[in-house]
């Protein structure tokens, strides 16, 4: 099982820095946890092909600063995996830092024909999860998109699911946008290696995943050349002569990485402003800023717990899933979320893609008013914001609203 000892999680980083302890599993027990039973229907569906994959990044210790480590998108190696115990050891041999993601496709045309005339055929849809979740929490919605013809790509963000990191510990939200870039880049490289052209790509994210999508779109400028993106990913940090660690290539320092063109985005209840129901008090925030320096992994604030939905079945399913993070918000993660929202607010005018925003007016986690303010600043003429009266944060579960509403501009 994943680690559930808060005191040990506080002490362990200091022991690692002092060389007194070595982490034997950089996913801290998550990599080989069983698949959540409700997701087995999708995993075992003979009409659906899926591939588990992981992409390796340079270890944090190889960078001059942690900020550089959080922001790196340098791909050292990528491989298909089967989620076997021995892959933890082989992952350690490759540096011990990876992003996991999965790829889903229909094997044959679905019975009854393609939904919506197959509007997703030849297109990719990337689903980005929120706080405390992981990629396969989208399992109930994936079949709809597959039947519409989409290839669906589902990342586990850093510190979630089968990606590495202390569970739900995000010292910087740069980790999220960098991970999304890495997954998209590896997908392009995989297609090009297989003689396939880059597909038209749509991004969708909810809550923290919505933040990741929005910030990714403003941080990484687009290029029409998939081959250029793939070539940039192959320009790895090079090992120094002694073979230890990785040396930064000076010419890339401070450069923005170019991303592939994104055709559109569909964002639910984005984390752009915290609802008053979930934001900790000023005293708790002040205490957290002190704790950040010596106990950043400490679970401190209740935050979103109990505020996602008024349907008890939503919470029951969440707590029954062993790959979800069930404890309170960690100090470092909470502060990183606040900093990320401030940064997104500053640069919202740079998000220039066709986009649809959706939010519930009774959301007790993120504020729909913040989404409206963000919408007003988006420069693309092809934009839409839809509010659902009385809906809460868990919109894909709430009152039957399905995430499977089509992403913006599927053509």
Image (cartoon, rainbow, N blue to C red):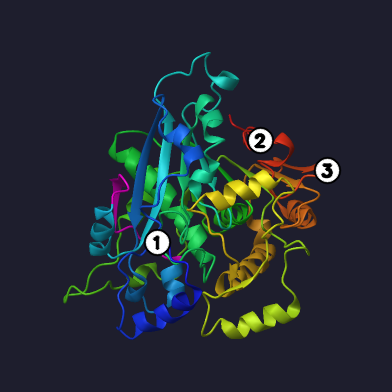
- Of the pair 409 and 84, the residue shown nearer to us: 84
Name the residue carrying label 1: 164
Q: Residue 297: x, y in percent?
A: 51, 74
Q: Mark 1: few, some, or many residues within 10 Å (few <14, many ≥20)?
A: many
Q: Residue 225: x, y in percent?
A: 42, 44
Which image quarter is the N terminus in?
bottom left
Magenta range is: 71-84
Name the residue carrying label 2: 402
Evaluate if marks 2 and 3 touch, with contact meaning CB atoms under 8 Å apart. no
Query: In which quadrant of the rendered view does residue 407 lie?
Result: top right
Q: How far apart are the alpha carbons under marks 1 and 2?
A: 30 Å
Evaluate if marks 3 and 1 touch, with contact meaning CB atoms under 8 Å apart. no
State the SS at label 3. Answer: loop
Q: How far apart are the alpha carbons under marks 3 and 1?
A: 38 Å
Q: Earlier in the sequence, mark 1 or mark 2?
A: 1
Whether residue 152 appears in this view of the structure is yes
Would residue 186 be counted in the magenta stretch?
no
Residue at 80% x, 56% y is 369
Residue at 36% x, 69% y is 251
Residue at 45% x, 57% y is 179
Residue at 63% x, 80% y is 288
Image-based side of 338 in relation to 281, left or right: left
Image-based side of 60 in relation to 350, left or right: left
Q: Mark 3: few, some, or many residues within 10 Å (few <14, many ≥20)?
A: few
- Of the pair 200 and 367, the residue shown nearer to us: 367
Which image quarter is the C terminus in?
top right
For residue 389, the mark is 3
């Amino acid at each position: 099982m994943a680690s559930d000892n808060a005191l040990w999680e506080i002490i362990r980083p200091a022991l690692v820095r002092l060389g007194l302890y070595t982490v034997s599993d950089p996913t801290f027990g998550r990599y080989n946890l069983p698949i959540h039973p409700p997701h087995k229907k999708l995993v075992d569906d003979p009409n659906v092909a899926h591939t588990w994959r992981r992409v390796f990044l340079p270890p944090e210790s190889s960078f001059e600063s942690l900020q550089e480590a959080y922001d790196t998108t340098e791909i050292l190696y990528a491989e298909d995996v089967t989620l076997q115990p021995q892959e933890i050891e082989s992952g350690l041999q490759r540096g011990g830092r990876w992003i996991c993601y999965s790829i889903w496709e229909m094997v044959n045309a679905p019975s009854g024909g393609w939904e919506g005339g197959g509007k997703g055929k030849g297109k990719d849809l990337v689903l980005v999860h929120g706080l405390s979740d992981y990629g396969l929490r989208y399992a109930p919605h994936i079949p709809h998109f597959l039947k519409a013809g989409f290839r669906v790509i589902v990342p586990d963000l850093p510190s979630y699911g089968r990606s590495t990191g202390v569970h739900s510990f995000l010292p910087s939200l740069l980790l999220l946008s960098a991970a999304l870039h890495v997954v998209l880049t590896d997908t392009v490289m995989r297609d090009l290696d297989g003689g396939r052209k880059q597909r038209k790509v749509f991004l969708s994210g909810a809550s923290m995943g919505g933040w990741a999508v929005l910030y990714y779109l403003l941080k990484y400028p687009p290029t029409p050349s998939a081959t250029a993106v793939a070539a940039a990913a192959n320009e790895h940090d090079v090992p120094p002569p002694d073979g230890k660690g990785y040396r930064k290539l000076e010419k890339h320092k401070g450069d923005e990485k170019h991303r592939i063109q994104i055709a559109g985005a569909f964002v639910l209840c984005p984390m752009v402003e915290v609802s008053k129901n979930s934001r900790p008090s000023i005293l708790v925030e002040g205490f957290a800023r002190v704790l950040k320096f010596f106990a950043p992994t400490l679970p401190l604030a209740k935050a979103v717990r109990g505020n996602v939905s008024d349907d008890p079945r939503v919470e029951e399913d969440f707590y029954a899933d062993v790959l979800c993070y069930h404890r309170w918000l960690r100090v470092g993660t909470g502060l990183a979320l606040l900093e990320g929202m401030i940064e997104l607010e500053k640069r919202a005018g740079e998000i220039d893609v066709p986009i649809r925003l959706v939010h519930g007016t009774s959301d007790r986690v993120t504020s729909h008013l913040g989404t409206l303010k963000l919408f007003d600043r988006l420069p693309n003429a092809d934009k839409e914001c839809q509010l659902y009266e009385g809906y809460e944060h868990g919109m894909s579960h709430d009152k039957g609203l399905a995430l499977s509403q089509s992403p913006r501009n599927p053509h």
